[in-house]
Image (spheres, rainbow, N blue to C red):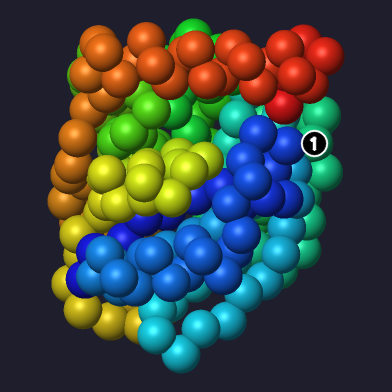
């Protein structure tokens, strides 16, 4: 099985992609599971064709934390530990998202209470992802992969490969570190184009961070 655990829809302020289009495109790509994890917004989705893991990308006071398998929206603006505790209280797992990204990455300020680290993010360069992998190994926690897609054509650029199973099997595989994070690192050319888009979106939001 392979899946993309970090996708944004129109319910994030920096994406306009319809959830139905995300689901259809992911099925077309041959993905077996996805998570539509919007910024500080929680929605549940169902599909007969693909496993959809409930998720949210939460803005803590130090940076972004990916919450998967949750049952309710996790509020933004809390400390890392408060955010992680709220995720666990909601039945979810807490993932350190793109930790070494210059903007919104927690970096060296991390606390040692995460269930997994996002070691492959298609909006990060090779060095950023390499540092994340090193951190996951250092903490001896699970490893995940997500495109961090804000546009349809970004979905599936990186993904997590795990043995076949249901949603609970996916959860256990992530926590136990059973799987292979694979896909494309961001090239220099694509990084320049991406930062141009991100800068334009940032300006259109009145220079407000998410």
Q: Nearer the viewer, residue 123 or 93?
A: 123
Does residue 134 appear in the picture of this structure? no
Judge whether 14 appears above or below 172 on screen: above
| 82, above or below 48, in the image | above
On the question of residue 205 being in view, the answer is yes
> Horizontally, is 42 left or right of 97 in the view?
right
The quadrant of the image that shows the N terminus is bottom left
Query: In which quarter of the view is residue 209 placed?
Result: top right
Q: Is residue 204 left or right of residue 68?
A: right
Q: Position of residue 162 (x, y in %)?
A: 21, 65
* Mark 1 surroundings: few (<14), some (14-19) or many (≥20) residues within 10 A: some
Residue 40, given in percent of the width and then of the height, sits at 74, 43
- Does 136 sit left or right of 35 as displayed? left
**Which residue is label 1 attached to?**
76
Residue drawn 62% across the image and 41% down it: 15
Q: Considering depth in this image, is 95 or 13 the residue closer to the camera?
A: 13
The residue sitting at 58% across, 52% down in the picture is 17
Residue toward you, 25 or 166: 25
Quadrant of the image occupied by residue 20: bottom right
Which quarter of the image is occupied by the C terminus?
Answer: top right
Residue visible at 44% across and 28% down? Answer: 98
Give the percent coordinates (x, y) of residue 57: 62, 43
Question: Farthest residue toward the bottom?
Answer: 48
Tell me which corner region of the image, top left, top right, bottom left or bottom right, holds residue 81: top right
In the depicted structure, whether residue 137 falls above or below residue 55: above
Query: Percent from the top left, x then y, of residue 42?
Result: 73, 58
> Height in image: 150 above or below 186?
below
- Count of numbered circles on the image: 1
């Amino acid at each position: 099985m392979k899946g993309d655990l970090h996708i944004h829809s129109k319910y994030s302020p920096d994406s306009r992609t319809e959830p139905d289009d995300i689901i259809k495109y992911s099925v077309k790509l041959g993905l077996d599971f996805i998570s539509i994890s919007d910024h500080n917004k929680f929605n549940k989705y169902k599909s007969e064709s693909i496993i959809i893991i409930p998720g949210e990308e939460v803005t803590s006071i130090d940076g972004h934390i990916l919450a998967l398998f949750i049952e309710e929206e996790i509020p933004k603006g809390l400390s890392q530990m408060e955010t992680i505790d709220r995720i666990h209280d909601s039945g979810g797992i807490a993932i350190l998202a793109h930790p070494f990204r210059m903007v919104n990455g927690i970096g060296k300020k991390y606390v040692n209470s995460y269930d997994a680290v996002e070691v492959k993010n298609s909006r990060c360069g090779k060095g950023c992802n390499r540092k994340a992998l090193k951190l996951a190994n250092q903490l001896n926690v699970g490893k995940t992969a997500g495109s961090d897609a804000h546009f349809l054509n970004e979905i599936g650029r990186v993904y997590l490969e795990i043995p076949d199973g249901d949603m609970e099997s996916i959860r256990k595989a992530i926590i136990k570190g059973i799987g292979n994070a694979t896909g494309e690192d961001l090239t220099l050319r694509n990084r320049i184009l991406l930062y141009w888009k991100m800068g334009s979106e940032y300006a259109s939001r009145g220079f407000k961070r998410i």
